Image (cartoon, grey):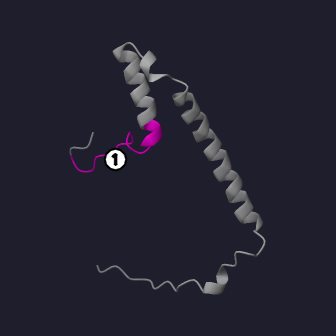
Amino acid sequence: MVPRVIQVPKTPKESYNPSRPASSLLKSQVLHLHDALEAHDAEVKEALATAPERLQTEGEVSDYVRTVTRILHPHAGKRQAKKGPNAT
């Protein structure tokens, strides 16, 4: 079966007006983004509060690397579910 291609018209240039007051939807989206950024900022501040030169054990280094990697690469730890007959 050949997939159907649905043509989507381009958005007219007049749809965006940088001087037009923002809608309540846009303002709501900005609030959600701000909340997410604050949560991310708290994680970054916590990681930056750790002085790397004070890490003494492999466990401390491991915890720090795990935390920083999770912040810098949030999708890296998420694994794709296996598909097929041998999926576990």
Picture quarter with the C terminus: top left
On the image, the x and y values in percent for residue 43 come to: 56, 34
Q: Say if the magenta span includes residue 74.
A: yes
Picture quarter with the N terminus: bottom left
For residue 34, side relative to residue 45 (left or right): right
The residue furthest front is 53
Q: Residues within 10 Å of mark 1 (few under 14, many from 20)?
A: few
Q: Say if the magenta span includes residue 31.
A: no
On the image, the x and y values in percent for residue 5 come to: 39, 83
Identity of the amino acid at label 1? Answer: Gln
State whether residue 37 is above or below residue 55: below
Residue occupied by mark 1: 80
Local secondary structure at mark 1: loop
Of the pair 43 and 56, the residue shown nearer to us: 56
Residue drawn where x is 62% and y is 46% of the image: 36
Residue drawn where x is 52% and y is 29% of the image: 47
On the image, the x and y values in percent for residue 85 come to: 21, 48
For residue 32, side relative to residue 73 (left or right): right
For residue 84, side relative to residue 17 (left or right): left
Residue drawn where x is 38% and y is 39% of the image: 77
Of the pair 64 and 1, the residue shown nearer to us: 64
Q: Main secondary structure of the magenta part?
A: loop
Residue drawn where x is 56% and y is 28% of the image: 46
Question: Disc count in the image?
Answer: 1
On the image, the x and y values in percent for residue 42 come to: 61, 34
Q: Which residues are magenta?
A: 70-85
Residue 76 position by quadrant: top left
